[in-house]
Amino acid sequence: MFSNINADSCPWRVVWITGAGRGIGAALAKHLCRLGCTVYGSSRSLDELIRIQREMAATPGRFIPVPLDIRRPTQISALFERWDKENVSPDLMVLNAGTHNPDGAKAFSAQSCRRLLDVNLQGTINCLDFALRHCLAKRSGQIAVMASVAGYRGLPSAAAYCASKAALISLCESLYMDLHDSGVRLQVINPGFVRTPLTDKNTFQMPALMEPEQAAEAIHRGLLSSRFEITFPARFVYWLKLLRILPHRLYLPLMRWVACRSA
């Protein structure tokens, strides 16, 4: 997709990626390892991380498995304490971990919403707590938060997911303004549809579906830019941004119609 991306366009020496066991996180971790980065990859599944470590053994970089449940602040605290002792300082932190359960209103429950929000929203906030303190203390560093174009507006069968991503977008917008002149770069990543174990759960047709490797290169390009929002693919997102400004009297019937056609 971006054939001119190479080691010379990789300014990060040490990177931390959450949700690195599969999907976009795994693809980004592999992409950066091939460019010579040391990548600390976090996931709840150690098996997935070890598989990636073996796969990346011959690359110029290094993949270091870090089993971690982002819902547990004590585990994140222990990781940063370990880095302090080992004099490790990530130049880039990509808070990518998330989950999705496509449930409609009939399956809606506080319990299912809480499970999703504990990962997508509170889990990311837990990581941001330590990441921001780390970066602010040294007045440098880059943090990218994985949200989604699903955070632009509500979508059928994705109430909790859309809510979590909308909250992350607003959270990052506020923090971005607060971080002015701090030396810390904060960006939000809003992908379209990417083929991952999460999108495999969707039962509708996904327009402009991208492969994880394409998404990794798009994210890399965005991380190198000065943009606050990293979003792709451009043509698909353009139409979503137009839908974002439609009044409810037009948007809601349109989405109902799209959902019925995709059913």
Image: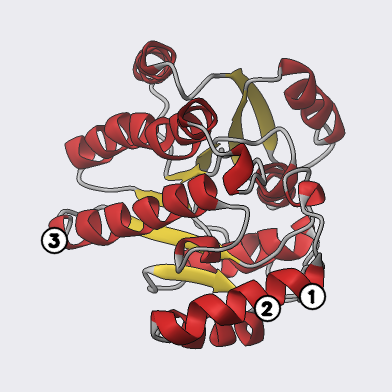
Asked where in the image residue 124 lies, by quadrant, the reply is top left
Which is nearer the N-term, disc 3 or disc 1? 3
SS under mark 1: helix
Among all residues in the image, which is located at the extreme front?
106
Establish if 48 lies above or below 121.
above
State the CA–CA distance, disc 3 to disc 2: 46 Å
Q: Amino acid at mark 1?
A: Arg
| Residue 174 in view | yes
State the CA–CA distance, disc 3 to disc 1: 48 Å
Residue 115 position, x and y percent, is: 52, 27
Residue wearing tag 1: 261
Establish if 153 lies above or below 246.
above
Taking the spot 68% from the left edge, 58% from the top edge, the residue there is 216
Q: Amino acid at mark 2?
A: Trp
Report crowding for label 1: few under 14, some 14 to 19, many 20 or more residues within 10 A (C-alpha): few
Residue wearing tag 2: 257
SS under mark 2: helix
| Residue 145 in view | no
Which is nearer the N-term, disc 3 or disc 2? 3
Tell us which disc is closer to us: 3 or 1: 1
Q: Amino acid at mark 3?
A: Asp
Depth check: give the residue in front, 237 or 52.
237
Taking the spot 43% from the left edge, 51% from the top edge, the residue there is 163
Image quadrant containing the N terminus:
bottom right
State the CA–CA distance, disc 1 to disc 2: 6 Å
Tell us which disc is closer to us: 3 or 2: 2
Report crowding for label 3: few under 14, some 14 to 19, many 20 or more residues within 10 A (C-alpha): few
Residue 244 position, x and y percent, is: 44, 80
Image quadrant containing the C terminus:
bottom right
Depth check: give the residue in front, 21 or 84.
21
Taking the spot 37% from the left edge, 11% from the top edge, the residue there is 74
* Residue 181 circle label: 3
